[in-house]
Image (cartoon, rainbow, N blue to C red):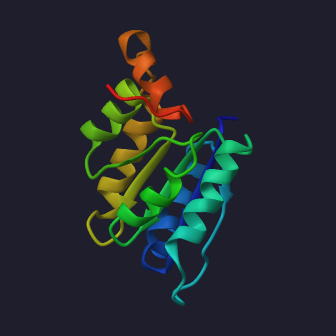
Amino acid sequence: MADIIAIASDHAAVELKATLAAFLRDGGHEVLDLGTDGTASVDYPDYGYRLARAIAEGRAAKGVALCGSGIGISIAVNRDPACRSALVSEPVSAALAREHNDANVIAMGSRLIGPDMAKACLTAFLSTPFAGGRHQRRVDKLSSQERQPA
């Protein structure tokens, strides 16, 4: 069995969340579905924080964050220093987010990306390893609570 993947969305992306959760399960992944499960209006930060907490607590190795644009939920996830969420809309940026930034969460906007492109992004994200090396010190700075001037 592959790593556990957490997935969360607001009401705008509930259909895409269901599609990607099924895609992940079909690919052999265990999915931790953190909601929402309906189209009634909800606040995306609540679901971004749920996803971030699952990553920080080790209940999931990686995550998928979805809202209408992907922007708001990505900001919410990134408020937790354990998370490195990257907003992507095509597979190259999804792969680079993993390779160079060791992103552990992928964010996408359901109003901006179709299900086939979202699956392609998710596949690139999950199949690309972190390169380490010269990128490691930068990633360490992203996860640090201490902010230092450049």
Location of the C terminus by quadrant is top left
Q: Against 4, is 21 above or below?
A: below
- Placement of 70 over or under 28, stated as above or below: below
Q: Is residue 52 visible?
A: yes
Q: Look at 37% across and 37% down and name the residue there.
A: 124
- Work out which residue is located at the far bottom of the displayed protein and give it: 40
Task: Identify which residue, 67 or 91, lies in the foreground.
Answer: 67
> What residue is drawn where x is 52% and y is 39%?
104
Q: Is residue 30 visible?
A: no
Name the side, left or right, on which 36 lies relative to 96.
right
Q: Please state the horizontal and vertical placement of residue 66, each as a whole percent of the image.
A: 45, 63
Q: Quick one: 78 or 94, which is closer to the camera?
A: 78
User: Residue 142, position in %: x, y?
Assistant: 46, 33
Q: How many marks?
A: 0
Q: Residue at x 42, y 29 (%)?
A: 148
Quadrant where the N terminus lies?
Answer: top right
Residue drawn at (39%, 30%) of the image: 101
Please state the horizontal and vertical placement of residue 92, each as a whole percent of the image.
25, 37
* Quadrant in the rendering for residue 109: bottom left
The extreme top residue here reads: 133
